[in-house]
Amino acid sequence: MFSFPTMIACLLSVLAVCTVRSRFDDPDMWWHLKNGEIIFTTHTIPLADIFSYTSNHQALVPQEWLSQLAIYSAYRCGGFSGLMLLLCLLASALLVGGYLLCRLYSGNAKVAFSGAMAIWFFGTIGFAIRPQSFAYLLLVAELAVIHLGRTQNPRWFLSLPVLFAVWINCHGSFMLGIVVACVFLFSSFLRVETGPLVSRPWSPVRRGMFALALVLSVAALFLNPVGIKQILYPFDTMLNMPILFSQVEEWAPLRMTDARGVGLLGVLLICILPAAARRTELYWDELILLAMGAWLAFGHIRMLSIFGILAAPILSRQLSTSWENYDPREDRIWPNAVVMGMSLAALCLAFPSARNLAAQVEDNSPVKAVEFLRANHLSGPMLNDYGFGGYLIWATPEYPVMMDGRTDMYEWTGFLAEYGNWALMRTDPNLLPDKYKVNFCLLSRHSSMVLLLPLMHEWKVAYTDNNSAILVRDPSASAAGR
């Protein structure tokens, strides 16, 4: 209980909570929360959009329904504090689970801390109350199961189908997990000793058990609400959504001048240079996973978290001889216990209060603007800011949104390009409001449209605060202006 690894796990939990305590109000959290509420209260999974008046009830692939249900369950149990507790638990589990994975893989409980810190460093790009947080944990679990199956009892492999049955209902990244498993299966056949690059074939029994587990895992993917459509969803995202990848910030390419870009190159060098200098070996599957993780991260900022998880155990193994290993016989129980007690106190102090969480929401979401809407009984249709759509789905379901963070759906309908042209002022500012007969706009206070629309006489600013503005259409003012 008071061992050195347990003490490290406590410190990592403190780091996780301190990292996420100010990250409560993610714009996409709200529509995930609303979907979870619908699933919880109706006992059905929505298969078509019911939140936006521009989607024409577009059919949906419910590839995150289980995560959404978990998110709403946390809210139902504890409100905003319950959601924050869920985020803290997910972030802590990722770092502690990553530490345990790196310890298993490297055999060094001290050096494994460096792997956990790599996961933290790259994971800070994506810590949020969103379904991908569950996916990161599942990827760590998959890597741990595969390592235990190939180094200890191959029966560990048989837990993979259960993992994938959960994963496909939590997040669309399940396909990455399948690819990772295929990398290990491919490498299990290879016998390579080309300088520092090494691959040793697995025993036929172990390889056969893993192949069987992989086949069962693919079969387990069909345990979802819509069958093959949900399995094909990741391919549709990659092949048929160019606007999503080109205009949404989290899908933008990584800039090498960014601190995480420099860190990525540093991790790659630490993993590869010792092998190149013949000080260590680099396994074939490690090289493939490093290349795949780096390719994903260079292509999309969002994938930095994936790179961190894939690279962390490799980084730890390459550094395993740089620091003497942990010896349980030399554990200092009382100093460890003191640090753990201090960590517990720090966790309690770092956890944000309900007032703090409400303030975070008010700072980032149009809370006061929604109060104005209801007090003044404004009638729609509404043109809303992209970043506000999720909160409006949660807070004002009586006002269908024009746009929100479900960019895949809007790209399917063709509306994403239309909205993007309007927001970037590539078209007449009145073209979109006129087409959808918009009566008022709820926009970010810093949107250029807040300055531009009132110049056209037909629009007037009815409300403004630190983060949002409401503009109301006044046809009489337009006539007077003409």
Image (cartoon, grey):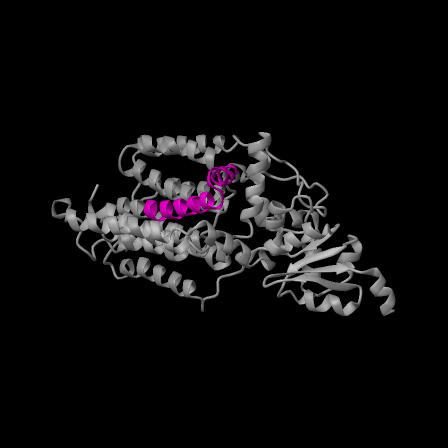
- Residue 33 showing in the rendered view: yes
Observer-nearest of 153 and 63: 63
User: Where is residue 73 shown, x and y percent of the image?
Assistant: 49, 37
How many numbered tags mark residues here?
A: 0
Which of these two is toward me, 375 or 251? 375
Which residue occupies the foreground of this view, 67 or 299? 67
Left or right placement of residue 238 versus residue 265 in this view: right
Quadrant the N terminus occupies: top left
Q: Mainly helix, strand or loop, the magenta region?
A: helix
Q: Report whether residue 194 is seen.
A: no
Q: Quadrant of the C terminus?
A: bottom right
- Residue visible at 34% across and 44% down in the picture: 97
Q: State yes or no: residue 269 in magenta.
A: no
Q: Is residue 51 left or right of residue 76?
A: right
Q: Quadrant of residue 207?
A: top left
Q: Relative to residue 182, is residue 101 drawn left or right?
A: left
Magenta span: 69-98
Q: Position of residue 6 (x, y in %)?
A: 24, 45
The residue at the point 84 percent across, 65 percent down is 478
Above or below, 472 relative to 184:
below
Please say whether residue 93 is one of the residues in the magenta stretch: yes
The quadrant in which residue 388 appears is: bottom right
The residue shown at (61%, 48%) is 406
Q: Which residue, as the protein is rendered here, is positioned at the far left?
A: 329
Depicted 320 relative to depicted 216: above or below:
below
Image location of residue 216, percent across then percent down: 44, 30
**Where does the image place residue 74, in percent across and percent down from the top left?**
47, 40
Q: Nearer the viewer, residue 417 or 479?
A: 479
Reply above or below: 200 against 228. below
